[in-house]
Image: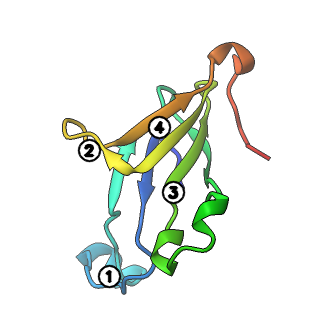
């Protein structure tokens, strides 16, 4: 997971090899891999932190592919924390389903870490 400028969140599949290349980055840094999904996650300009939520206790005894993260938490300088369902996406926007968003009253000047 990566997040930052412009309020964008992006996810990559680290289990797949680097197969796509971009001519400019290929010359200087190697391979360029497109994210599996990316979306505008917050109203502010920056997302300061993004973390996968731990799996539920019921999924700990499930097959290994069930351990793929299904929930994501993001925090931004818009003063909110968002809880995303990565298993459901919007047909209109392609973004994951927003399960919950904190109130800006708690962090009016932004959130810079979820530690």
Vertical arrangement, residue 98 with respect to residue 55, above or below? above
Looking at the image, is mark 2 or mark 3 nearer the viewer?
A: 2
Disc 2 to disc 3, how far (Cα)? 17 Å
- Residue visible at 80% across and 47% down? 115
Looking at the image, is mark 2 or mark 4 nearer the viewer?
A: 2
Disc 2 to disc 4, how far (Cα)? 16 Å
Q: Secondary structure at mark 4?
A: loop
- Look at mark 3 in the image and give the residue it sits on: 2
Classed neighbour count for the residue bearing mark 2: other residues with Cα under 10 Å, few (<14), some (14–19), many (≥20) = few
Residue 5 screen position, x and y as percent: 49, 43
Q: Is residue 64 left or right of residue 22?
A: right
Q: Earlier in the sequence, mark 2 or mark 3?
A: 3
- Residue visible at 36% across and 87% down? 17
Q: Out of 107 and 73, give the one closest to the viewer.
A: 73
Q: Secondary structure at mark 3?
A: strand
Q: Is residue 7 left or right of residue 89?
A: right
- Look at mark 4 in the image and give the residue it sits on: 7
Q: Secondary structure at mark 2?
A: loop
Q: Earlier in the sequence, mark 2 or mark 4?
A: 4
């Amino acid at each position: 997971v990566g997040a930052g400028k412009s309020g964008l969140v992006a996810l990559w599949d680290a289990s797949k090899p680097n197969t796509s290349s971009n001519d400019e980055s290929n010359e200087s840094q190697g391979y360029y891999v497109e994210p599996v999904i990316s979306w505008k996650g917050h109203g502010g300009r920056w997302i300061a932190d993004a973390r996968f939520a731990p799996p539920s206790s019921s999924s700990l005894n499930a097959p290994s592919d069930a351990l793929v993260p299904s929930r994501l938490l993001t925090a931004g300088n818009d003063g909110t924390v968002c809880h995303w369902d990565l298993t459901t996406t919007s047909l209109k926007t392609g973004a994951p389903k927003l399960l919950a968003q904190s109130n800006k009253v708690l962090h009016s000047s932004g959130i810079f870490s979820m530690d």
